[in-house]
Image (cartoon, rainbow, N blue to C red):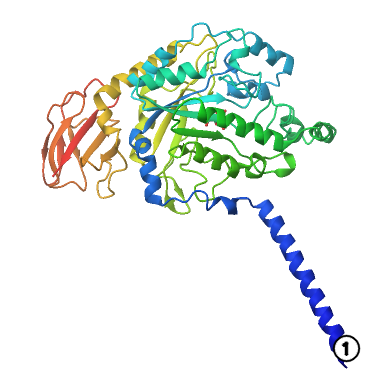
Amino acid sequence: MNRVIFFETIKKIAIYLLFFSSSILVNEVAVAQKPESKFKYVWNETEQQRDERLRWWTEARFGMFIHWGIYATPAHGGKKENSEWVKLFGQIPEEQYQKYFDTFDPNLFDPAAWASAAKQAGMKYVVIVTKHHDGFCLWDSKFTDYKATKTVYGKDLLRPLVDAFRKEGIRIGFYYSLIDWHHPQYPIGKVHPQGWYPFEEKDQQKIRQIEEINKSRDMATYAQYIRNQVRELLTQFGQIDLMFMDFSYPKPAGEGGKGRNEWESEKLLDMVRKLQPQIIVNDRLDLMDVQGGWDFKTPEHRVPEEWVTYNDKRVPWETCHTFGHSWGYFRNEPGWKSSREVLDILISCVSKGGNLLLNIGPTAKGTLDDRTQERLREIADWMKLHKQSIYGCTEAPKEFKEPIGCKLTYNPKTRRLYLHLFTWPKEGKLELSGLANKVYFARLLNDGSEIKYTDDPAVLTLPTQPPSVAVPVIELLLR
Ligand code: GLC
């Protein structure tokens, strides 16, 4: 009897030990697969603190994006519209792409002129593409030779840009491509010049060749390269206000998708936040469900229907747009937006509580082409007279309804309402619903001239001739 009890007890202990050790193992695997659990405690900030950290940016509303690299030389998009993707969609072989590197000589580069154009246009921050998907670096990175300083031009292109924009009082942001089509350790997947068509066409033979090549590539080495480079960017250029990482595509994993595990996003972001605690970071690191894993959302090439939300909560957001479709310089690109269309986008963003990051694609010579200069000038003309309806403004309280053909923005500090008239009412009258007895004074923003109105119902009497500005704005001072 005693012997039976003895063996039963031994058995129980053994089972318990087995279970316990395997659960440790399982947990370790789980921790290894979900590194985010560690991060949650690294960046612990209340929503209020975050809003405070983002304040300069939400008040700025308007920034400049700059896509500039050796893709400005081919200046077309291959089968698609984007010149910065031409290596992939143009299926440009390495030797040919190398020519764009070897011949890159932007000898008319004048960063002060770019910065001044941005300043005039009313842009308060800049986001410079320091490295795009093709891997070419604007700065003198210690970790690669694929950089501006090794071209015939021979000089760092990033530092003069940073200095010039800073001199104009413009905040500095860096775009950094997580994707890299040049780095020898970057595993080839679908989003890669060598991988796109094989995966798209399910070409098994080519896919096997890719798998063979990938055996000698190491993601962890490349992830370290990202950290090394981002560390340079965040330690050698003074205060950096914003970091725009681009981009994650974790699915489909079988096609070489890459996301938080591959980039080691949390480790990277942890470093970023430690190096520059005030920095604002976009949402493309594949850390949406991680607290502090992103600061703002980035819908691209579209104005959202309404204030962008995440988990049903309104969040800070910025949309990026370019004049045509290509981010990089595209010679003779059709379908460029007029400056009025761009202003419409800007106003629409602000009216929904968001920012606009407007892109320019400078030429291979380092200049802004005529189309770009003309539009920036026209935007500048408008901003000079109407900036109050943009800076510090946001969505108007719901009780104020937008009249047909108009967009409203609102400055909560000054309690002023801005009515942007995209169509000028022929009958000369404009009724404002929700504003009866609430308006103290109304005037045109371009010249400060008074606009007559009645209190109840609130009706504006407009001059028959609209002012000659791209989008007329009436400022309503509320009681
Ligand atoms: C995309 C594109 C890219 C562009 C960026 C701008 O992710 O890959 O070419 O730089 O969006 O937001």
429 or 62: which is nearer to us?
62
Q: Quadrant of the C terminus?
A: top left
Instruction: Sort mark 1 into few (<14), some (14-19) or many (20+) by Cα contacts within 10 Å.
Output: few
Tell me the residue at 51%/33% (across/down): 244
Residue 74 visible in image: no
Quick check: 224 left or right of 326? right
Image coordinates for residue 317, horizontal then vertical, percent: 43, 40
Task: Report which quarter residue 411 is drawn in.
Answer: top left
Q: Is residue 224 visible?
A: yes
Which quadrant of the structure image shows residue 27?
Answer: bottom right
- Residue 177 pos. (x, y %): 59, 30
Residue drawn at 46 percent across, 33 percent down: 242
* Looking at the image, residue 140 lies above or below residue 473: above
Q: Locate residue 63, reporting x and y percent.
A: 40, 28
Q: Residue 475 at what x, y percent from top left? A: 20, 34
Whether 276 is drawn above or below 23: the answer is above
Left or right: 42 in relation to 316? right
Is label 1's Cβ within 8 Å of ligand 1? Answer: no
Q: Quadrant of residue 110?
A: top left
Q: Mark 1 is on which residue type?
A: Val
Residue 184 position (above or below residue 36): above
Name the quarter showing ligand 1.
top right
- In the image shown, does 371 or 158 lie closer to the viewer? 158
Q: Residue at x 58, y 44 (%)?
A: 266
Q: Secondary structure at mark 1?
A: helix
Q: How many labels, in total?
A: 1
Q: Viewed as shown, does residue 474 lie left or right of 239?
A: left
Which one is nearer the viewer's eye here, 162 or 277?
277
Residue closest to the eye, 323 or 294: 294
State the residue position of label 1: 4
Tell me the quarter of the image containing the N terminus: bottom right
